[in-house]
Image: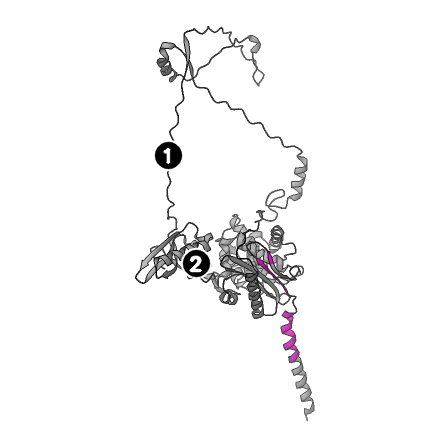
Amino acid sequence: MKDRSRRPIRWGLVAFATFWMMIIVPLSAAAAPYAALVMDARSGEVLHARNADTRLHPASLTKMMTLYVVFEAVENGEISLDTPVKISSHAASEPPSKLGLRSGQTIRLRYLIRAAAVKSANDAATALAEAIEGSEARFARRMNRTAKALGMTRTTFKNAHGLTERGHLSTARDMTVMGRHLFYDYPDYYNLFSRITADAGVRKVYHTNRRLLGSYRGADGIKTGYTRAAGFNLTASAERGSERIIATVFGGRSTATRNAKVAELLDMGFRRAPTRVALHRPARPPYMGKIGAGEGTPGGYGKKVRLVAAAAVKRSLRPQARRVTEPEAPVVLAAKDDIEQAILAAQNVEVVADITAEVTPEADATVATGSAQAPLPKVNPQPRPKDLVLARLEEPKPDPVQEVVTRVSTSGGRNWGINVGRYPSQYKARKILLKTALNEMSTLDGSLRKVVKRPTGFDANFMGLTRETADLACRRLQAKQITCFMIQPGGGA
């Protein structure tokens, strides 16, 4: 017969274990240390800081630096956005979050960028690192070199994706600096961080921070991150009017609490930031190229070689400029009554040699090869007649240069446009166009503001854009809660 008396004890142990699992597991993320920093992106002024210089696990905030290095490589011609990248077994084996790439698969670089920026895919980040530097270890060295150049003094990268690794650490201050450089150094790529969805080639991906982007007015990026050691991290940027605030949080307890805290910090930043402040863009670091591109070359780690060369050269001699003398106008001899004929004769003169000194045999020269040169003949010039005068031929003045100014053509793909709304009056439409142009100068500079009368109102359009510029402008305006849609060549939306 079974002993039923032990059953309550057994059930009690199960209940006790379940209770502690419910308490301990959620607290694993909460155990991550908290840190935060709020910065006015325009001036770089810190508006709030807490544990901002504590070295913590950055998680996928790491991918901001990964993408920064990739943008640098693309801009300087190391690689193209359409370069096919072959996926290694190392990249394919990265744990989630991932795009699901297979070993040996080929995919264009632009899709890897989208997957890393929007979905925070670890396999895409590793593939990017291997495509740029050949290995993730070399790419990490380049990340650290770039971090030092950006002023990220307390950051060390060990990988391209941000998964927990010993010594892979950063701070809230350094990650805020990283986000600010992304915005100012590569504005053409920054719109990636505000895309709710993106085509990653093999499938459609969704933004890991779409909740904050959709709920916080003016939010347009930048990057989320989570590991058990790091907690829930986020570097976010938002713009309202002329003000832009960047906030970073390390060690959030959950996605919801992290987003709420970031929204609170952004609100604090907008309250504390002055409405008018001088814009001080961060200094963009010089391009240094690939790791180990060559000792002593701008692209390599040839610091030692350069120092030795500098020490060896004690003095740099500047060559003297060669003296250039303007040829004199032709000179002819003419009688007082025959000046006109002298001028006509001078127009046919090519070379006039006036030897006024007697050449002696002592003036003989020797050529550079050492061979002797024949002595010049002795010349006794005849005295100038007293009734002669000098007539100098004035050189004709060149015709004035005619400058032709033409208007820039809208060919070459600049036949797209964007619409920012329909308004009841022409005045209102023009006012909105001017306000929008001032608010989005980086993409709309050079476009044509055009008001089109419709049966139901006046359309406010920007014309003369390329398709890429129109798409970028619309995305940036939509991120600022401004209505915008693209106008195809021919007028279609």
The residue stretch that appears in magenta: 19-46
Q: From this view, report whether residue 409 is shown above or below residue 85.
A: above
- Position of the C terminus by quadrant: bottom left
Give how far across and how far down residue 349 sits, in percent. 40, 16
Front residue (pair 105, 137)? 137
Q: From this view, report whether residue 15 is shown above or below residue 60.
A: below
Do the residues under discs 2 and 1 have CB atoms within 8 angstroms? no
Asked if residue 225 lies in the magenta stretch, the reply is no
Give how far across and how far down residue 448 sits, in percent. 38, 51
Tag 2 residue? 474
Q: Secondary structure at mark 1?
A: loop
Q: From this view, report whether residue 364 is shown above or below residue 294.
A: above
Residue positioned most to the bottom: 1
**Residue 108 can be seen in this image:** no
Q: Which numbered circle lies on residue 402?
A: 1
Q: Which numbered circle lies on residue 259?
A: none
Residue plotted at (39% across, 26% down): 397
How many marks overall?
2
Earlier sequence position, callout 2 versus callout 1: 1
Q: Amino acid at mark 2?
A: Cys
Residue plotted at (50% across, 22% down): 325
Give how far across and how far down residue 209 sits, in percent. 53, 65
Q: Is residue 101 left or right of residue 13?
A: left
- Position of the N terminus by quadrant: bottom right
Mark whose residue sits in front, 2 or 1: 1
Q: Amino acid at mark 1?
A: Gln
